[in-house]
Image: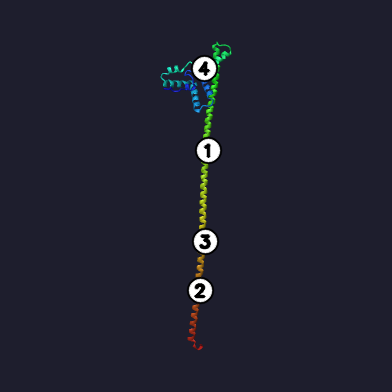
Amino acid sequence: MTPTRTLYDVLQVSPHAEPEIIKAAYALLLRKRDGGTDPGTLRLMKDAFETLIDPASRASYDAKLRDAQPAPASTVTAAEPALDSPPSAWARWLLIALAFAGGYTGASMWHQRTITQMILDHEAALASQQAEIARLSLDQRAREFETRSSQSEAAREQRAREAQARQRERELAATKARLDRESAVYQRTREREEQAREREALRRIEQTRRERAAEDARNARLAQQRLANEKRELERLYRENYPQYR
């Protein structure tokens, strides 16, 4: 069964590695990755470094590892080969190269500790710098992602607003066209009604005029008839009463 990968495996260091070794290993891994690693792996490396470099976090993590692995002794013994982890091996080879370059192989322990401390300090500074660069890179990527997301959301909202505006324009145009048609129909209907009323009024006036003319003609005929009747009656009475004057 494959053992669970720990944060020590992520940084490629021993569970007993010193903080300086952890810093150097983290810096070396960052240089090896050289920006070609996915953000998830960089985030995992960053989390592993921040957990193991802090004594309290590391102690808590080691306690969890002991609880999860009741018998880690054989595993740890087997996991520590004669070859050291890449950062410490690189440091030892650098010490040996410096020793041979200086023309001595039996340097004192004080010189070795001083050089080792200088290398570790330099590696720690590089590790801190690389960690800060990685953090800034992750933050920059997160900000760029948020910016792209916000820009995409803003573009979608802008397109939605433009679509709504076009829809409102189409609705307004359709409403205006409908109102224009209704207004034209109403105007034509009103004109026809007015013309019909005018024709009806003229017809009534003409009918009234004709009726009055007919009435006047009848009255004139009746008057003439009465005059004729009265004339005949007068002539009859004259003949009867004054026969000598006939």
> Residue 143's x, y, as percent?
53, 31
Residues at circles 3 and 2 in contact by the CB criterion of under 8 Å: no
The residue labelled by disc 4 is: 89
C-alpha distance separating marks 1 and 2: 91 Å
Disc 3 to disc 2, C-alpha distance? 32 Å
Density class for disc 3 (Cα within 10 Å; few <14, some 14-19, many ≥20) is few
* Residue where numbered disc 3 is placed: 195
Cα distance between the residues tagged 4 and 3: 112 Å
Give the secondary structure at mark 1: helix
Task: Give the mark toward the camera: 4 or 1.
Answer: 4
Q: Which residue is mark 1?
A: 155
Between 26 and 206, the residue placed more toward the observer is 26
Disc 2 is placed on an element classified as: helix
Q: Residue at image x 54%, y 28%?
A: 137
Q: In the displayed structure, would residue 2 be above or below residue 194?
A: above
Quarter of the image that includes the N terminus: top left
Q: Nearer the viewer, mark 1 or mark 2?
A: 1
| Percent x, y of residue 57 | 47, 22
* Disc 3 to disc 1: CB gap under 8 Å: no
Query: Which residue appears at 50% of the width and 76% of the height?
Result: 221
User: Marks 2 and 4, Cα distance to the nearest angstrom?
Assistant: 145 Å
Q: Secondary structure at mark 3?
A: helix
Task: State the residue position of label 2.
Answer: 217
Q: Earlier in the sequence, mark 3 or mark 2?
A: 3
Residue sitting at 52 percent across and 61 percent down? 195
For image coordinates 49% across by 83% down, the residue present is: 235
